[in-house]
Amino acid sequence: HLELGVTGYWNPLNGNLSVVTPGFGEYNEHAIQVSNRGDLWFAGTYQTMNVSCFEAGDLLEITFRVQLEGYTDVCNPNVTEEVETICPFVILGSNHKDGSYHHERIYDTEMEWNEQGWNIFHVMYTMKERNINPQNVSD
């Protein structure tokens, strides 16, 4: 839907979500922008996915292009331990039957980071039982 200039299934985690131009590349005129994040620089966009078609062990390919305007001093994708400055990242979350929430941060630690331009995030993530059937898994 983004190519049509609408956000479709995307929602802001915090702040305001809008479609802006230009986006990345010759044919993609649009990009999603999250503004007014306050102190939550990491609070970008999210979408709810139906995971009923996944099984544990399935590969989920996560690919997107990202540009962080005004946050380049806090972003370092090449950090190997989980610290506040590692970004960008994807959160894969699961709601549990007891009302608790499980989440995993997924990083692309091999990303070549360009502070002034667009960057490619690409990860092959192996789905785990806790991602697809959290009601039966205790953390």
Image (cartoon, rainbow, N blue to C red):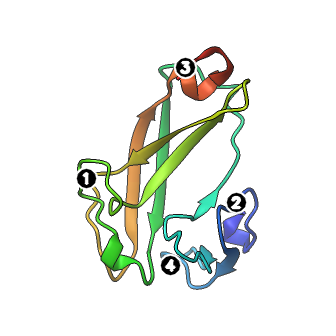
In the rendered structure, which amino acid carries the disc numbered 4? Glu
Measured Cα–Cα span from mark 4 to mark 3: 40 Å
Above/below status of 117 relative to 139: below
First in sequence, mark 4 or 1: give its number: 4
Q: Which residue is mark 3?
A: 129
Q: Which residue is mark 1?
A: 110
Ranked by sequence position, the earlier of labels 3 and 2 is 2
- Residue under pointer 4: 26
Instruction: Specify the label residue 10 is tagged with.
Output: 2
Quick check: 125 above or below 91?
above
Q: Quadrant of residue 113?
A: bottom left
| Contact (Cβ within 8 Å) of mark 2 with mark 1 | no
> Looking at the image, which residue is at 39% across and 51% down?
122
Q: Earlier in the sequence, mark 4 or mark 2?
A: 2
Q: Say which residue appears at 47% left-offset and 20% top-offset.
A: 57
Query: Is disc 1 placed on a helix, strand or loop?
Result: loop
Q: Amino acid at mark 1?
A: Glu
Give the Cα distance between marks 4 and 1: 25 Å
Q: Residue at (29%, 58%) from the top-left corner?
A: 111
Check the picture and name the quadrant holding the N terminus: bottom right
Q: How many marks?
A: 4
